[in-house]
Image (cartoon, grey):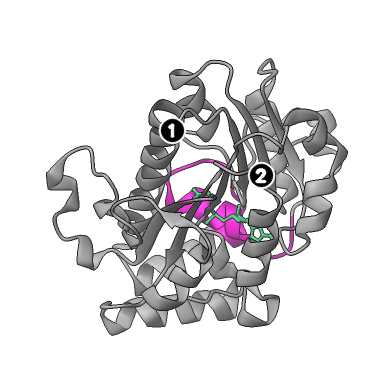
Amino acid sequence: MLPPGSVGLVTSDWQEITEPEGPSVSRVYDYLLGGSHHFAADRVAAMEFLARWPDATETMRVNRAFLGRAVRYLAERAGIRQFLDLGSGIPTAGNVHEIAQRAAPDARIAYVDIDPVAVLHSRAILAGNDNAIAIQADLRKPGEILRHPDLQAHLDLSRPTALLLVAVLHFFPDADEPARLVAELRDALASGSYVVISHGTTDGQPRHVAEAMSHYAQTTAPFVPRGHAEILRYFDDLDLIEPGLVRAPLWRPDDPRDAENAAQVAVYGGVGQIQ
Ligand SMILES: C[S@@+](CC[C@H](N)C(=O)[O-])C[C@H]1O[C@@H](n2cnc3c(N)ncnc32)[C@H](O)[C@@H]1O
């Protein structure tokens, strides 16, 4: 029998996983985005977060929209055909493979997440899609990801690739050296590749936003919002694509009205290219 809150998993897969004790980043995020892959502990954490920051879901939605525009830009305008999505999360509307393969049906995607539930759901959604895979791995060990046999069989990293680090680096405290992780991954990619990053911030935010993030960090997982200058360091040695590192809605908006009230959005986004 499937645990409460689970949807869409095949029982044989599910037998590997029992209901986790605490909340997980991917499932709390799924709940906040209106998904259906979460347990009671995730819903409690999400509701505590929303009680402190009622507009949080708007920032999540804006982050997903940034991800979608960046992938579309890379597939349609930059000719990228390989996507390595690290911290990919639980699939929801507008997944990377759907957007990339709409523009280029031969686009190949590798999703990587640490959460086994996210990886199982990804595999269920990707069944029948030979050009997309999901791998369970820890982004804090980039060498293991890069050497993973499934990744090596699926992507040819000697060809231009888009590395997606969207809404994930803020889960790494400074002790994890996120800038070093980004540099190690960047150095493994071919010239002409791209790096897409979004990252939570408290820049210009009211105090309750910082308090909500701090409470989340105490109850769910480490969460380290960073300022513009610090996030910009992740783009060291990359050529930033216009308009640079900006509040996520300001990154090539489809409709100028989407960029209204951008300063109220607690996430920066940017895309850089490897020369
Ligand atoms: C907020 S979600 C972002 C999902 C997706 N990138 C997006 O922006 O919509 C962050 C994801 O990062 C994953 N994550 C956190 N720490 C990780 C790690 N050390 N290695 C791999 N994935 C990790 C979580 O499991 C979660 O699915």
Which residue lies under the disc numbered 2?
A: 118
Front residue of this view, candidates 102 and 2: 102
Q: In the displayed structure, does residue 102 sit left or right of residue 132?
A: left
- State the residue at coordinates (40%, 38%): 68
| Label 1 vs label 2, nearer the camera | 1
Q: Amino acid at mark 1?
A: Ala
Along the line of sight, the residue nearer the viewer: 143 or 34: 143
Whether residue 106 is visible to the viewer of this picture, yes or no, is yes
In magenta segment, residue 90: no
Q: Residue furthest front?
A: 275
Task: Please indicate, yes or no, whether residue 23 appears anywhere in the rendered image.
Answer: no
* Residue 139 x, y percent position in the rendering: 71, 58
The CB of the residue at mark 2 lies under 8 Å from ligand 1 = yes
In reply to whether residue 32 is colored magenta, the answer given is: yes
- Residue 191 shows which numbered tag? none
Where on the picture, by quarter, is residue 248? bottom left
Image location (x, y in percent) of residue 69: 36, 39
The residue that appears at 39% across and 54% down in the rendered structure is 60
In the depicted structure, whether residue 152 falls above or below residue 245: above
At x 71%, y 37%, the residue is 158
Which region shows up in magenta? 20-42
Q: Nearer the viewer, residue 247 or 22?
A: 247
Q: Amino acid at mark 2?
A: Ala
Q: Looking at the image, is mark 1 or mark 2 earlier in the sequence?
A: 1
Residue bearing the label numbered 1: 78
Helix, strand or loop under label 2: helix
Q: Secondary structure at mark 1?
A: loop
Residue 101 image point, x, y percent: 51, 21
**Which corner quadrant of the figure contains ligand 1?**
bottom right
Q: Is residue 30 left or right of residue 34?
A: right
